[in-house]
Amino acid sequence: MRLALLIPLYAIVAIMVVYTIRHYLFTLNRLFGRHRQPYVDIGTAAWPRVAVFIPCHDEEKVVGHMLDALLAGDYPAEQLAIIPIDDRSRDGTRGILDGYAARFPGRVRPFHRDGGKPGKAAALRDASLHAEGADADIHLVFDADYLPGRGLLKQLVAPFFDIEVGAVMGRVVPINVSKSLLTRLLDLERTGGYQVDQQARMNLGLIPQYGGTVGGVRRSALLAVGGWSDDTLAEDTDMTFRLVLAGWDVAYQNRSECYEEVPETWPSRIAQIKRWARGHNQSLARHWWALLKRPAHVSRAKVADGLLLLCVYVVGPLLVIGWGLALTLYYLGVQLAPGLLVIFAVAMYSTLGNFAAFFEVAAGARLDGSRGRLRLLPFLIIGFLVSLVSVSWATLVQLLTSWRRGNNHQWEKTERFRAPGMAVPNGEGEP
Amino acid sequence: MRGKSARREVERARHFEAMRTRGFRGGLIVPHRSMVGLPWTALRFLTTLALSLGGVLLLYIALPSLGRLWQEIFERARDFLGLAAPLGDQLWNLPGGLEFTLPVLAAGTPLPGDGALRIATIVTLLVFGLTVLLPVRFTPLRYFLRLLAIIQATAILFFAFAADPFPYRLQDHVFVLLSAGLVIMALVPLVLGLTLHVFDLALWKKLLLTLAILAHLAVFIPLQVLVHIWLVMHGTALVMPVLFLVFGLLLDILVFVSFYGWALSWRGELERRDLPPPAHLAAPIRGRGRGR
C-alpha cells in the first residue's frame, strides 16, 4: 500500500524536477546564449499582401483603439486588408466596424457572422476562407484589445520571407500593469514567458508557441494543414503543433512587442486560465502521439520540448495529486526524506504560474531593465495558488465530461476593462 | 616609438568603441531589451563557484555553533512560552560521517478529545463558510483558507474515525522540521550559485545576501518550530498536519524567495558603471539544423 503511494509520488517529484531543469536551461540560454533574431532588421522589401483578422464578440470598449492603431501603421495600405470578424456581437461592435468600413473603404472589411459555430476558432476558420481579402499571402491575427505599434506588421511579416516559416509570434506586453496586484503579477508572468521562455525556444531551435494573437500564419501553410480547427478552445496551440508536424517552422520575434490588456479581476483571470487549460489539454490529446512518433523532419529535441509544452497544464493536477499522496502518506506514518520534502516544497513554489518559474521571471524582468518590480516575486505564490486550483478544476471537469460529444461551443473571451473613450498608448509607448 | 604609437591606436579604438554607445548629452545607448543578455566571464564563473562552495563550507564549519544556537533558543523560549518539558538533544547522522545535534523538547503529544474535535469541526466549518462570504477580490485568500480547511478536515476525520493511532509524536514533528530546515540552509548557497550569482551583482552584495539568508533561517527555523510546539500544546495534535504541510517548509522557501527577489531588484554592475548590456546576437543566416 505504502509502496503503491510512494512510487507515483516519486514519479511526480521527478516530473517536477524535469520542468525545473527545463526552466533553468531556458533561462541560462536567454541570459548567456546567442540570440536568434534573424528577421528583425528587414525594413525595406516587396511586402506581400496581408490580411489582419480581428475576431470580435462584444468588443465595443476596445475595437476602435485597435483599428486606429492598425490604420496608423506603416504597412503599405494597398497590400493590407483589415478584417474585423464580428461574431454575433450584442453590443455596439457591429456599428463601430461598419462605421470604420465606411470611412476606410477597401482597407477595413468587416466580416459579420450571425450563424454557424460560435467562438474564436470557428470565426477565424470562416473568415479565413470566405472573407473579402482573405486570399492574402499572410494572415495575421490580433485580439481586439491589442494595440499594435506603427511598425509591428512589417516586423511580423518579415519572417515569412523565409519560405520555411509557417507561423510567427510576437511578444505580448501588458498595458494595464499598475491597476492591481493581479495585473502586476501577470506582468511578471508574461515577462518570464516571452522574454525568456519563447526566446530561448527560438534560440535553441525548439518550438516557439504561436499564441493566437500578435502573430500569424502563412496562408499556404494554413491551407496545407486544413485551416483553423473550429472545435478547439486553443486554436493557437493546435495550429502550432499541426504546422510543426507538417514540417513548418514557427518563428518568435522578441522585438515585435504589442500591448494587451490583462485581466484586472480574479474571476476574469480564472476564466482565462481555465479556458487556456482546457484548450491546451485538447491539443495534448490530439497531438502527443503524432509528436512522439517523430516525423523525419522533427528533431528529438523538438519532440521533447513539444511534449513538455503540451503537458504544461497537466502539471497542476499532478501537483494536487502529489499533495494528496503526501497527505495520505503522512497519515500512514511514512516520513519522506528531508531532501525529498524540500524538492517537493520547491516544486510547489516554483512550478506553476503560467509555468514561468521565478528564476525565469527574475531574469526576464532584469533583461527588461525593470528590476524594481522583482520585489513582488514572493507574491507570485498568490497567482500560483489560484492557477493551481483553477487549472486542476478545469482539467478534472474536462476529464469527467470528455465523453460528451456535440456542438457545445460558445464564445469564451476575457472581460475587457478599458473605457471606450480612454486615451491609450499608440503602441510605441507614447500616450 | 612603435610601441607608443600602437598604444595610442588601441586607446583611440577604445575611445571610438565607447562613443558608439553614447548618445545625446553623453547618455548611454543600450540595445533594445529584446536583444540584451548578460556577460559571462571566467571571473564570474570562479566567484560563483567560490561563493557556492564557500557558503556550504561556512555552514559546515558553523554546524556546532548552529546546534548550540538552536539549543539556546529552545532553552530561552521554553521558559518564555511556559512549556513545562525537559530539553534534550538528538544526534542526527548526516551523509559523509557528519553529525548534527538537534534540540529536543521532551513534551508529550496532546491528543484531541471529543470536545476538541467538536470545536475544531465548528471552527473548520466557519472558516469554510467565511470563504463563501469573502468578496471576489479576496479570491487568493479564499482559496488559501479553503486549502487549510480541507487539510484540517482530514485531520478531524482521522482522529474521529481512524483505527490506527496517530503515527507521530510532537518530537518527530520537531525533528523533521529542523532537519529539513537544515537541508534548506545547506541548499541556499548552491541554489544562489545557480540562480543569483550568475547575474552581474557586485561580489560583496552576493556574499551579503548569502550570509543574510543563512542568518535569517538560522534564527527563523527554531522560532518557527517553537511556535508549532506551542500551537500543538494548546491545540492538540489536530493542528499538526496543517502546520507540517502548509506552515513548515513552504514558509522557509518563502523566506528564500523574498530575499532572492529583493536582491535581484538591486542595481547591477553594468548599470552602476554606466555600461550597456551586451547583445549576444547569432549570425543572421545559418544552415538548417545548426543554431536554428
Image (tube, helix red, strand yellow):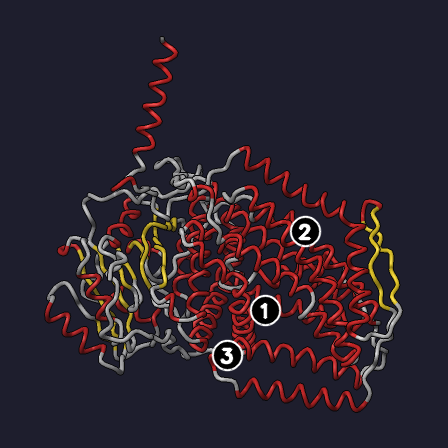
Report the Cα–Cα distance between label 2 and label 1. Answer: 27 Å
- Of the residues tagged 1 and 3, which is closer to the observer? 3
Cβ–Cβ under 8 Å for marks 2 and 3: no
Report whether A192 appears left or right of A54. right
Q: Badge 2, how many Cα within 10 Å: few under 14, some, many 20+? A: some
Q: Position of residue B24 (x, y in %)?
A: 25, 42
Amino acid type at mark 2: Leu
Instruction: Name the chain letter of the residue that bears numbered label 1.
Output: A
User: Which residue shows up at 63% across the image and 54% down it?
Assistant: B213
Residue at the spot of label 1:
A317
Q: Position of residue B174 (x, y in %)?
A: 79, 66
Q: Badge 3, how many Cα within 10 Å: few under 14, some, many 20+? A: few
Cβ–Cβ under 8 Å for marks 1 and 3: no
Task: Examine the image and state in which quarter residue A214 appears.
Answer: bottom left
Residue at the spot of label 3:
B138
Q: Which disc, if any, is residue B187?
A: 2
Secondary structure of residue under mark 3: helix
Report the Cα–Cα distance between label 2 and label 3. Answer: 34 Å
- Of the residues tagged 2 and 1, which is closer to the observer? 2
Name the quadrant of the C terminus of chain A: bottom left
Report whether B280 appears left or right of A322. left
Amino acid type at mark 1: Pro
Secondary structure of residue under mark 1: helix
Camera sees residue A50? yes
